[in-house]
Image (cartoon, helix red, strand yellow):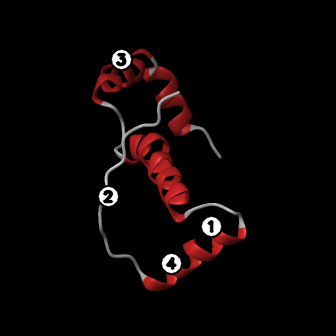
Amino acid sequence: MRKPPTQKFSSLMNRVLLDRLRREAESNGQSVRFLLENAVKHYLEVVLPYARGVRPEVLPHIEASFVENQELIRRLAKSPK
């Protein structure tokens, strides 16, 4: 299997976080690059999609559900907790 191409870049990071990242990588026998790539991948694939709120294509379905369940929503709003 062919490895994806890499590109060198430079950035700044909070020194305490970077030191902690380096210690963690060393203690696990991993590279800082490996941990950073996994963290970025997790952010892009798991965190970011949910941080954006509701996807636009879902909104019409939510609105239709509200219309369809108007009576139930009204009754639930009046019910004691």
Q: Which residue is drawn at 41% across and 81% down?
A: 14
Q: How crowded is mark 4: few (under 14 residues within 10 Å), some or many (20 or more)?
A: few
Q: Say what amino acid the circle numbered 3 marks.
A: Ala
Q: Say what amino acid the circle numbered 1 marks.
A: Ala
| Quadrant hosting residue 29 | bottom right
Q: Do the residues labelled 2 and 3 touch (CB within 8 Å)?
A: no
Q: Residue under circle 3? A: 64
Q: Percent position (x, y) of residue 2?
A: 47, 30
- In three-dimensional space, the C-alpha distance between marks 2 and 4, rounded to whole angstroms, equals 20 Å
Q: Residue at x 39, y 48 (%)?
A: 51
Task: Name the secondary structure under disc 3.
Answer: helix
Q: Residue under circle 4? A: 17
Q: Say what amino acid the circle numbered 4 marks.
A: Leu
Q: Residue under circle 1? A: 25
Q: Percent position (x, y) of residue 81?
A: 65, 46
Q: Which of marks 1 and 2 is in front?
A: 2
Farthest front residue in view:
2
The earlier-in-sequence mark between 4 and 1 is: 4
Q: How crowded is mark 1: few (under 14 residues within 10 Å), some or many (20 or more)?
A: some
The earlier-in-sequence mark between 3 and 4 is: 4
Q: Percent position (x, y) of residue 15?
A: 45, 84
| Quadrant hosting residue 56 | top left
Residue in front for this viewpoint, 42 or 68: 42
- In three-dimensional space, the C-alpha distance between marks 2 and 3, rounded to whole angstroms, equals 48 Å
Q: How crowded is mark 3: few (under 14 residues within 10 Å), some or many (20 or more)?
A: few
Q: Are marks 1 and 2 in contact (CB under 8 Å)?
A: no
Q: Residue under circle 2? A: 8
The earlier-in-sequence mark between 3 and 1 is: 1
- In three-dimensional space, the C-alpha distance between marks 3 and 4, rounded to whole angstroms, equals 46 Å
Q: Which residue is drawn at 44% across and 52% down?
A: 40
Q: Are marks 3 and 1 in contact (CB under 8 Å)?
A: no
